[in-house]
Amino acid sequence: MMRAPLSDLPLVIDQVSLEAGAARLLDRVSLTITPGPPTLIIGPNGAGKTSLLRLCMGLVGPSAGRVTWGGRTERAPERRAMVFQRPVMLRRSAAANVGYALAQAGVPRSSRAARGAELLERVGLADLAGRPARRLSGGEQQRLALARALARKPEILLLDEPTASLDPAASRSVEEIILMAAQSGIKIVMASHDLGQVRRLAGDVIFMLRGTVHEQGTASDFLETPVTPEAAAFLRGDLVI
Amino acid sequence: MRVGVWSMALIGLLGVTLAGAPATAEDRSIVVASTTSTQDSGLFGYLLPLFKAKTGIDVKVIAQGTGQALDTARRGDADVVFVHAKSQEEKFLAEGFGVKRFDVMYNDFVLIGPNSDPAGIRGQDIETALKAIQAKAAPFVSRGDRSGTHAAELALWKLAGIDLESAKGPWYREIGQGMGAALNTASAMDAYVLSDRGTWISFRNRADLAIVVEGDKRLFNQYGVMLVNPEKHPQVKKDLGQAFVDWLISSEGQTAIAGYKIDGQQLFFPDAEKKGS
Amino acid sequence: MSDQLSAWQLILGGDPTLFAIVRLSLAVSLVAVVLAALIGMPLGALLALTRFHGRSVLIVLLNALMGLPPVVAGLAVYLLLSRSGPLGALGILFTPAAMVVAQTILIIPIVAAPTRQTIEDLWGEYRDELSAMGVGPGGRMMTLLWDARFSLLTAVLAGFGRAAAEVGAVMIVGGNIAGFTRTMTTTIALETSKGDLPLALGLGLILVAIVIAINAAVWGTRIWAERRVG
């Protein structure tokens, strides 16, 4: 590819609604993602966090409204990558999984081995390169998924509750990688259920409720002084319906 | 690379298999459509190596019932037909599908039945025997497959004055298969069946069956050979096919036919005249 | 084949006719199953991954064709390859090539139908990841087929089993010509019609033993491979 890679930022979501059958997953959401510190998306289950992320990734298109990436409406994922809560490992070795991601990202065959080794090193899986990916532990698989995502040299890295199924030690190593990615300039957009994680990672917070963006702000503002009663209730740990 | 090895193995396998594919200029072989009685009796196993040794021609025999063999030839899928139903052969000739018909050999039909002989026909002539079978509704297996034997069987029922269509009942079992299958079925059902002597002599699963009627002049079974007409089907190998026809009716071929024996018994009797019709 | 000998004696004695027959049977069925896999797997995957009018009808048809009677397949191929038929000029009727064609047609649905189901199920699982990695339609098909390879192997084995076992198709298009198109199954049919039931049964057992051996070999390979790549 000879042309300069296009930018996916700013990611503008303009009055977007998302319907699936009779259910309204997102209801007139407007949002802009710009370069900067990590944006964490929080809210009760069913609030629309996953739907919002999938929309941002381009896996699904809006039923109403518009999504643009760097001003473009085509959904092909140029400079963004996503990590899912339960990653799907290809039936091959860890190194081959990363190699696959590199190939899909257009990296020429001659450079794949080196870049792959570098990525595995970055996520701490260098020793397990030859291991069948499906036999890695949950934490290792999530780190491999991150390596695959980073293979694309993304501008935006979307993550859907990546540590939800992991034990604390595994969660810590995953968070470290995410922080390093953020520090290298990648925009992190991440759904989380864990307020501690929000405190550790967030620059901005988006609080979702019933398919809408109920409140948003910088992490410190939101966490210390939430504006809406529902946000306050959520932060207290109440069930918000 | 593993993939490469597998590809080579596959190509090798394909080559081995398809070695039989489209005839090349040097391919000296012909396809002969013949009957199950000549195959099942083992005659071809005996004759063809002799023919090949003399001429270097490979004869590929497709063994079907006479009717099916003639149809195969009509479609142009055989070079020579070698069957035993004269009226069907003459029709084939009249339609222009054959060049010339030659008598080659004969044997006879025999009526086979269980040793217990429920219809009580042992030693009778064929006409009386069939009438008794029908009268007593004794189980009878018919080839039912438009073969030469089937045609002969139908002609014999007619000769005995029996209208099969109305006389048919559960006792008459049409199986639509070859002679071997018919004998197997008769053996399992303790039924009567008309067979050519050649197949009977070489048949191994006799159980309780034996010959009950034989020697009747009307049980004569004539075999004829024809080259398929190259005017109808240009790809017929007429020179090689003619060589086979010629050999069958030559004294060498005729002697060979007479020489085929099982347990000391001769199965087929050469009777070529060379004039043909 | 020598008369008066049992099937066991033929094997021990290394009877060349028997070995030629076994070789032909395996060659025809193996080539047919490979061709059927090369055609049937992409076909099944394509059907799994695309949407179009009449797709359900096609799926039902494909599933139904798994039960295509071999003799019907043989008859259809015979009419195609007959000199009086459209492809008669090929001149492959009554040769092993025709037998391969008939068996390939027979096996394609047996490979394609389960492939379609497996790939469709797998796509549900892989969809988000592959879309997130920007994998195009061709890439999806190859990736899913490769990841499903162990399950698909079972479909291929089913196809091979069907091919090795059938007699209707090879009898009609091959003609059961001695020394040329005679396979294990047509030989068993022939020996049965000659009344030599013990020999026919013996040959049948040999055929079953060979198919079991092949299945065992494939299973072993699968276990070994799974250990290496999960």
Image: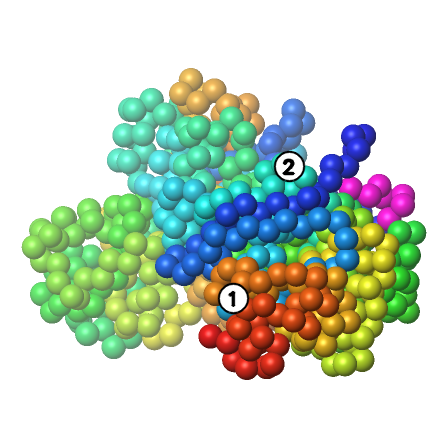
| Residue in the image at 19% along x and 74% along y | B118
At mark 1, the secondary structure is: strand
- In the displayed structure, C151 sits above or below A112; it is below
| Residue in the image at 65% along x and 34% along y | B56
Image spot of residue A170 (x, y percent): 78, 76
The chain letter under disc 2 is A
User: Residue tagged by mark 1?
Assistant: A209
Left or right: B47 as drawn, with respect to B10: left
Left or right: A92 as drawn, with respect to C47: right
Q: Amino acid at mark 1?
A: Leu
Q: Is residue A193 visible?
A: yes
**Boundaries of the magenta span:** A106-112
Q: Which mark is residue C165?
A: none
Q: Is residue C227 visible?
A: no
- Tell me if mark 1 has few (under 14), some (14-19) or many (20+) residues whose alpha carbon lies within 10 angstroms of its own: many
| Residue in the image at 48% along x and 29% along y | C88
User: Residue tagged by mark 2?
Assistant: A71
